[in-house]
Image (cartoon, rainbow, N blue to C red):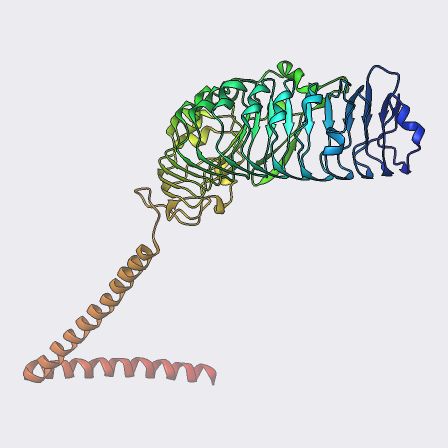
Amino acid sequence: MLSLSNTGISGNVPAWIWKIGHLNLSHNHLHGNILVISEHAALYQCIYLSSNRFSGPLPQIPPNAFDLDLSDNSFSGELSHFLCNVTTNATYSLQLLHLQGNKLSGEIPDCWTKWSSLTYLNLGNNALSGRLPESIGFLTRLRSLNLYNNKISGRIPFSMSFCTDLVKIDLGDNDIDGGIPTWMGTSLTNLWILILRANRLSGNISSEICQLNSLQILDLSDNNFSGIVPRCVHNFTAMATKIILSGYSNRSYNSTNFRESATVSTKGTEYQYDTTLALVTNIDLSNNNLSGGIPEELTSLVELKFLNLSGNSFTGLIPQSIGDMKQLESLDLSRNSLSGEMPNSFRVMSFLNYLNVSYNHLRGKIPESTQFMGFKASSFSGNDDLCGPPLTSNCTSSGGPLKKEDNHESGDKSSSKIEWLYVFVSLGYAVGLSVFCTTLVLKKSWREAYYEFVEEMWNKFYVYFYIKWRKLTKTSV
């Protein structure tokens, strides 16, 4: 046994090193070609060379190889010489084959019959093409199938229904078409993770999928699914019951404790989960053509943490019981046609730290809570009849937004009131003055009395100010 992982060593690897039974040189700067990994006298051989700079074709491996991790290198070429050019009478013991993140190309060969011991297969992040081969059904012990981010086309083969031990299927980011096979719900009852995002899948989401009651991660985003969400989603009991970590010790593989991982897109970002994967519960149906209402049954999944239904054609109200999903951390309902008011039960969702309901037809007042004050206004934009913080539009007494026209109208009314006040005051002054002047002209006795009054007042003011002036001048002298 030799373990030199994460030691920073570089250069070529000597030929004698491949005779070591348990070899771990992962996460270094090693390079060069590997033609053959020699058979060792040990019962099982484990080779871990991930995250280096090895290149060239994949090496030939001995029948007693148990684990082979060549991920995140620069191996190239096709898989056929590696999988198909094997010893005729040999029985291969390989359980873990990890080839993610290389430069492998060509079709996935139809010669898996010799590899029936595989429990973990990862060919993700390569340039593999063609259809999924029928012989993949011979991998009856397979528990994790990872073919994401390739160029695989065609339909999911029926032969995969014989892989009844599968707990994870990740076929995301390919060109697979057709629909979700109905046998998936009846044959693969152990499925824990189903990721089919970013393909060309279409049709309805059949109710058979609800039989996968162990499912914790369901990602069907960025496809062409249509119709309604099955009302039987409450059968996803793993998303409705509290997770007990001790029950998930079987999610690791072989003696090296190689743990399962998955990429989950949530809160507008992609996250890689491995050690905490058992705690993740996620449903992502975004960017499809789904319609109808959001089923009330969905809110019974009280242990669900991430829910994304954005970019569809959902209509109707947000279920009033949405507040029952108290473990929800991320909820995206944006870019649909939802209407009505936002339920007040949102206020009790204390773990909710990401919410997006933008570009719907929601109306009324946004529920008031400290949680909601922390969300951006963009999370609620595109709903013209929605009001209250964090939006800048205030609410009226009836709960609707205060429109700009209303502000203009009230302003016009108040300004017109002020203008009319000036008119009436001026008019009253003019009328009073004209009546007084007319009376003086027509009534001689009033006119004489007025002039006498004015003359008397003038004389009094003159005498008063004259005496004051005389006193001041005497004092100064």
Task: Tell me residue 329's x, y (percent).
Answer: 54, 31
How many discs appear? 0
Name the residue nearer the viewer: 393 or 101: 101
Residue 204 shown left or right of residue 190 in the figure? left
Residue 357 image-quadrant placement: top left
Task: Tell me residue 151's x, y (percent).
Answer: 62, 40
| Figure quadrant of the N terminus | top right
Question: Residue sitting at 14 percent across and 74 percent down?
Answer: 431
Question: Residue sitting at 59 percent across and 39 percent down?
Answer: 174
Name the residue nearer the viewer: 477 or 20: 20
Question: Residue sitting at 33 percent across and 42 percent down?
Answer: 399
Task: Tell me residue 44's x, y (percent).
Answer: 82, 17
In the depicted structure, whether residue 405 falls above or below residue 38: below
Residue 355 shown left or right of residue 232 in the figure? right
Residue 161 shown left or right of residue 297 in the figure? right
In the depicted structure, whether residue 439 falls above or below residue 113: below
Whether residue 36 is visible to the viewer of this picture, yes or no, is yes
Name the residue nearer the viewer: 474 or 420: 420
